[in-house]
Structures are given as C-alpha cells and as structure tokens.
Image (cartoon, helix red, strand yellow):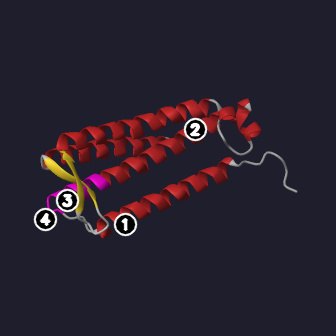
Amino acid sequence: MRSTRILYGAICVVYVGTLTLAAWALPDRLASHFSPAGLPNQWESRTSYLITNLILGVAILGGLPVLGVVSGRHPRFTNIGNREYWSRPEHRDEFRRGVMNLVLVLASITALFISVTQVVLVRANRTTPTTLPAFPYALPAIAFALITIAIAFLYLRRRHHQDSPRR
C-alpha cells in the first residue's frame, strides 16, 4: 500500500507539473481536438482548457480515492466475487486495502495518461502549422488501455478468493 501511495503522490505532482507546463506553453487560442488526419478541428481558449483539465484532475485524483474509501467500507454493496468471504470481519481490512490499492493505481495511470496527452497537445500547438501526428498519441493510448485491462484482470482474479475447498 505504501508504494501505491508513493506512486499516487508522484503522479499528482506530474499532473500539476504538466498542467503548469500547459498554462505556460500553450497559446491563448489552442487546437484542442484533432481529426484522424492530425488536423485541428476544434479550438478553445487556454483558460477554458486549463479549467477543464483542473476539474478533470480533481475528479480523477480526488474523486476516485473517495469512491475507493466508500466502496472499501461496504463490501456487501460492491459487485465482487465471493461477497460472503470479503464481508466477514476478518477479511474486511484486506478488502479495504485492496480496493484502495486498485483505485489509487487506476487514478494514477489515468492521470498519467492525461498528463502525457497534455504534453502531446502542447507539442502539437507549438508546431507550425498545428498538427498532431497519430503515432505520438496512439502509443500512450494503447498502453493506457492495455495496462488498465491488465490491472482490472489481476485485481478481479485476486479478489475472487475461494474460501471453500476445490472439488
């Protein structure tokens, strides 16, 4: 749990850093969405972009851990395999720790992905003409999807604890 919290804290710093970079490096009017060909197709103000990403960061880095605390305290309200096992008093602490670890890891990788997206967006807006080649963005998006799926699979596999002997 300690390493998960250190990861979470480091990603919070990275998110604030990339948001600061965006505030400093983005033009007053920036391309915020791009077509599959890499051409800008939506523009917005830097202030609007920063406010949106600030709210998104607070929701992900603040809201997901709160959701983890609430879910971890009530295993009977959580959709999980072998609920009776995890609802027992002797297993609740382990369940609570597991939920918080999962939520902190998911919040961290989501915030890291958004941070990478911000850096890519800053880079795209600093080129002339403004373009976003598919490759620099596709690789982090694919990695994010695969890592999220792997973490969810490993978590669900671990939480499907068998209390009864196998047949």
Q: Is residue 76 magenta?
A: no
- Element class at badge 1: helix
The dot on residue 129 is: 4
Mark 4 crowdedness (10 Å alpha carbons): few <14, some 14-19, many ≥20: few
Q: Can residue 3 be seen in this view?
A: no
Identified by mark 2, the residue type is Arg
In the image, is residue 104 above or below residue 132? above
- Indicate left or right for 137 with 161 as reference: left
Which range of residues does the magenta coloring cover?
117-130
Pointer 3 residue: 123
What residue sits 42% from the left and 46% below the top?
108
Q: Which of these two is toward me, 94 or 155?
A: 155
User: Which of disc 4 and disc 3 is earlier in sequence?
Assistant: 3
Query: Is label 3 in contact with label 1 (beta carbons under 8 Å)?
Result: no
Identified by mark 3, the residue type is Arg
Q: Position of residue 95 (x, y in %)?
A: 64, 38
Identified by mark 1, the residue type is Leu
Q: Main secondary structure of the magenta part?
A: helix
In space, the residues marked 3 and 2 are separated at their CA atoms by 39 Å
Pointer 1 residue: 139
Eye-nearest disc, 3 or 4: 4
Q: Where is residue 89 in the image (x, y as percent from the top left)?
A: 72, 30
User: Which of disc 1 and disc 3 is earlier in sequence?
Assistant: 3
